[in-house]
Image (cartoon, rainbow, N blue to C red):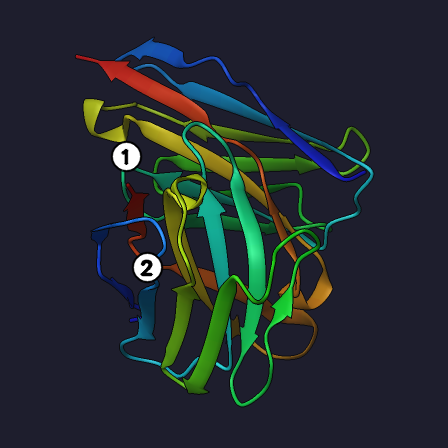
Amino acid sequence: SQKIEQNSEALNIQEGKTATLTCNYTNYSPAYLQWYRQDPGRGPVFLLLIRENEKEKRKERLKVTFDTTLKQSLFHITASQPADSATYLCALMNTGGFKTIFGAGTRLFVKA
Amino acid sequence: GAVVSQHPSRVICKSGTSVKIECRSLDFQATTMFWYRQFPKKSLMLMATSNEGSKATYEQGVEKDKFLINHASLTLSTLTVTSAHPEDSSFYICSARVHRGSGRAGYNEQFFGPGTRLTVL
């Protein structure tokens, strides 16, 4: 069955460092991969989308890589800040976006 | 742009009652909306796809008579939890799909509502 794995353990890093979160998937060939941020008790907020034919995408301090051979995406936050503390969800979409599968998310804590 | 609202944000009800949750796209029209359920520290679980003017498509294992979905307009979808029981307590989130770009460069983006915390006593 289709499966997305994100590190269930929380990631604790020091302010100013780069946070790297991993998303691995199996039994799926997504057309797009998305990353969302979710704060406690709130709905997810879209951050970045990367297509299957793209290797890397950047947006301000965020960078996403997508390796369809390894079936893995890495999500980087450079110069991290305490305000970046949240849960980050990886999501896979098929062509047309008719079905999106979400990972359980990784909790990030950035210490001042 | 692309703001999705949900109402109410929190609801507490007695077992056996029905609860309606509204999902609205505030500044755009959404022909397709999705309803998700999320348990603590778990991933979003898609419950159903709501299509304007037609019946919702439910995921396997989701009781359509239990979770009634109505998408009567291009900006409003409602989820009614009928005869709610404590096991229905959860965080319910809706999203609306927006198409960006065109042709091969086009893609679909989802915008989520803030969620509704349902507690059934």
Q: Position of residue B37 (x, y in %)?
A: 47, 48
Q: Position of residue A68 (x, y in %)?
A: 77, 38
Residue that numbered label 2 is attached to: B17
Residue at (60, 35) in percent of width and height: A65
Which chain's residue wears label 1? A
Amino acid under disc 1 = Pro
Amino acid under disc 2 = Thr
Quadrant placement of the C terminus of chain B:
top left
Whether residue A46 sits left or right of residue A96 in the image: it is left
Q: Residues within 10 Å of mark 1 (few under 14, many from 20)?
A: few
Look at discs 2 and 1 and give the one toward the viewer.
2
Q: Position of residue A56 (x, y in %)?
A: 59, 40
Viewer-side residue, B87 vs A40: B87
Q: Residues within 10 Å of mark 2 (few under 14, many from 20)?
A: few
Which chain's residue wears label 2? B
Whether residue A85 sits left or right of residue B106 in the image: it is left
Q: Is residue B75 above or below residue A22?
A: below
Residue that numbered label 1 is attached to: A40
Whether residue A16 sits left or right of residue B80 in the image: it is left
Disc 1 element: loop
